[in-house]
Amino acid sequence: MPTIKIFKYIDKLDCFLVNPDYKILADKLGLTEWNEVVWIGRYFSLDNDYGEHWFDNWEERDKIADQAKELGIEYNDLLVINSDRFKNDRDGPCHTAEDRKRFWTDVLRSLELSIDMIIDEAIKFNAQREIDDDDFVANLDDKINSVKTAYL
């Protein structure tokens, strides 16, 4: 099954952007909340809503905002790893903050998801919405078929 890369790593800023191809796909299928990777963060964070905030790292964004602007990157597009979001103090941490940041940077640099997984998530996501909800995708089946045609 074809896969799509989720993130684009910006080495100069040590941060990520959502891969433009994935961004288009997520928007088309109705997976975008305040950004296109919220639902993925939930999987990374013990499958709960804490994960939707995995990139709420405003202090880290502030540190690179001027450099990002020089590169033509919007502040709100910056996704910076804060290693403290990937630990808890109940039975750990087992690694240093630097090790966690390095690990999660490597994971996200290589993260690809199957088109099937993304489609299935969009179906579940849309089924939880009300028909009169602004985020409900009324023609989701048509959009899924066009995605399958493009990727499969």
Image (cartoon, grey):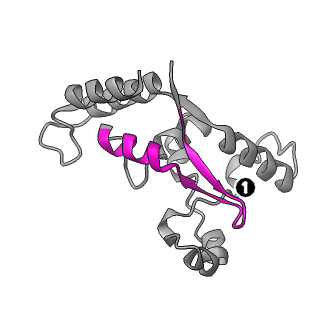
Q: Nearer the viewer, residue 54 or 18?
A: 18
Q: Which residue bears the numbered disc 1?
A: 84
> Which stretch did the figure color magenta?
4-28
Considering the numbered disc 1 on the image, is that residue within a helix, a strand or a loop? helix
Quarter of the view holding residue 66:
bottom right
Residue 69, above or below 113? below
Quarter of the view holding residue 110:
top right
Q: Nearer the viewer, residue 43 or 115?
A: 115
Question: Which residue appears at 54% of the width and 47% of the height?
Answer: 50
- Asked if residue 87 shows in the view, the reply is no
Residue 26 lies in the magenta-colored region: yes
Residue 110, above or below 73? above
Residue found farthest to the left: 132
Q: Left of 12 or right of it: where is 16? A: left
Q: Left of 69 or right of it: where is 36? A: left
Residue 39: x and y in percent read 46, 40
Residue found farthest to the top: 1
Residue 11 lies in the magenta-colored region: yes
Residue 102: x and y in percent read 80, 50
Q: Left of 17 or right of it: where is 95? A: right
Q: Amino acid at mark 1?
A: Asp
Question: Which residue appears at 56% of the width and 64% of the height?
Answer: 78
Dot 1 crowding, Cα within 10 Å, few <14, some 14–19, many 20+: some
Residue 54: x and y in percent read 58, 51
Residue 21: x and y in percent read 45, 44
Residue 124, above or below 50? above
Quarter of the view holding residue 108:
top right
Q: Nearer the viewer, residue 21 or 121?
A: 21
